[in-house]
Image: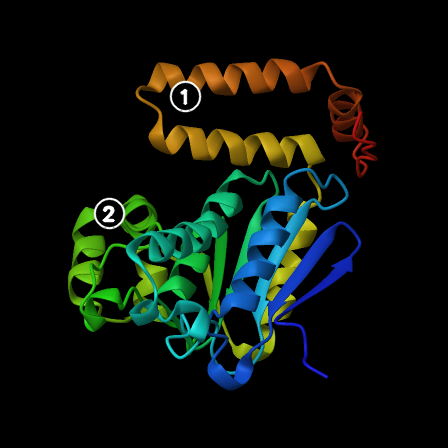
Amino acid sequence: MTEAPLIISSRGDVDWICLNRPKVSNALNGALTDSLYNYFNELRNNKSVRVVVLQAKGRNFCAGLDLKAKDFDVSEKTVSETWSVQRRIGDIYRAMRRCPQPIVSLLQGAAVGGGFSLALASDIRIATESSRMSAAYIKIGLSGADMGSSYFLPRLVGVSIASELLLTGKFIDAKRSLKCGLVSEVVSEDNLESAAQKLCTELLQATRMGLNLTKEALNFGIDAPSLDAAMAQEDRHQVMLSMTKDALEGISSFNEKRSPKYQDR
C-alpha cells in the first residue's frame, strides 16, 4: 500500500503536516503538490485550525521538484501545458500566504528550489544546525527567480543577499540564515519539534482573530504604499478587535493576573 505523500495530524488547535517522501528527500511530485495545494486552499475556511506546523520526514526538508517524475517531464508537454503545471505549483505558495493561520516551518538538511520556497512562504522558520537552503533553479539552466523566491527573499534578507543567492544558486547555511534573519532560531535536530511546540504554545495565547489579523496586517504591510496605508489597516483591525468579548476578557485577565479564557467571540 502506497503511503500518503502528506501526513496531516491535528493536535488540538494546531495542524502538524509532514512531507512524506523521505527516500527522495521529499521531492515534489504530482501527488505531493496536489496534496499541498488542496490542504492550503481548504485551510483558508477552516476555523478549527489556528496554527500550522510544516515539517518533513527524513534527513532533508525538501529537494524541490522531482525532476524524474513524469508529471513534470516538460519534454513531452506543450508550452500551454507547462504553463498550467507552473501555475498549479505556484498556487501552493499563494495559498500559504492567503490562509489566515500562521505557518511555522521546521527545516532540517536541504531545502532546495520549490522546497526553499515552502520555507520562504511560511511565516516563521526554525532550522537545525544541518539546515541549508538554495534556490538552485539557475543551476539547471533556468532563471534563479521562481516560485515566489524573487518576492519573498529580498523582503526577508534584503536585496544584496537575495541577489547573491538567486544569481548563483549557492547554499546558505543555518548560521548565516540566523544572522541575516532568514530563520528565527537554530536548534539541534533532537530539539526541533520541542522548539516548535514551545512556539505554538506562545502563539495560542492569542485569540484566533488576533493571530489571523496580525498575519494579514504583516502581509499587507510588506507591500503597503506608505506608513499611512499600513497604519490605516492596523487601525481598522484594532478597532474591530477591541469590540469583541475576547478583548474584554484579555484586559480583565491582565488586570487580575490570570490566564485569559478566550471563546472566539
- Residue type pointed to by label 2: Gly
**Which color scheme is applied?**
rainbow
Q: Position of residue 253 (x, y in %)?
A: 79, 30
Q: Is residue 46 left or right of residue 41?
A: right
- List the residue tagged with mark 2: 158
Q: Are marks 2 and 1 in contact (CB under 8 Å)?
A: no
Left or right? Give the position of 95 relative to 169. right
Q: Nearer the viewer, residue 139 or 260?
A: 139
Crowdedness near tag 1: few (<14), some (14–19) or many (≥20) residues, C-alpha within 10 Å = some
Q: Residue at x 43, y 29 (%)?
A: 220
Quadrant, the N terminus: bottom right
Residue 223 to residue 182: above or below: above
Q: Position of residue 59 (x, y in %)?
A: 50, 83
In the image, residue 45 sits, relative to residue 110, either above or below, namely above
Quadrant containing the C terminus is: top right
Residue wearing tag 1: 230
Q: Residue at x 22, y 72 (%)?
A: 140
Number of disc labels: 2
Whole-Å distance between the Cαs marked 2 and 1? 20 Å
Task: Give the SS element for disc 1.
Answer: helix
To which quarter of the image does residue 167 belong? bottom left
For label 2, the crowd category at 10 Å Cα-Cα, with few meaning under 14, some 14 to 19 and many 20 or more, is few
Q: Amino acid at mark 1?
A: Ala
Compared with 54, 241 (above or below) is above
Q: Residue at x 65, y 15 (%)?
A: 240
**Element type where label 2 sits in the image:** loop
Q: Residue at x 83, y 32 (%)?
A: 263
Q: Position of residue 135 (x, y in %)?
A: 29, 64
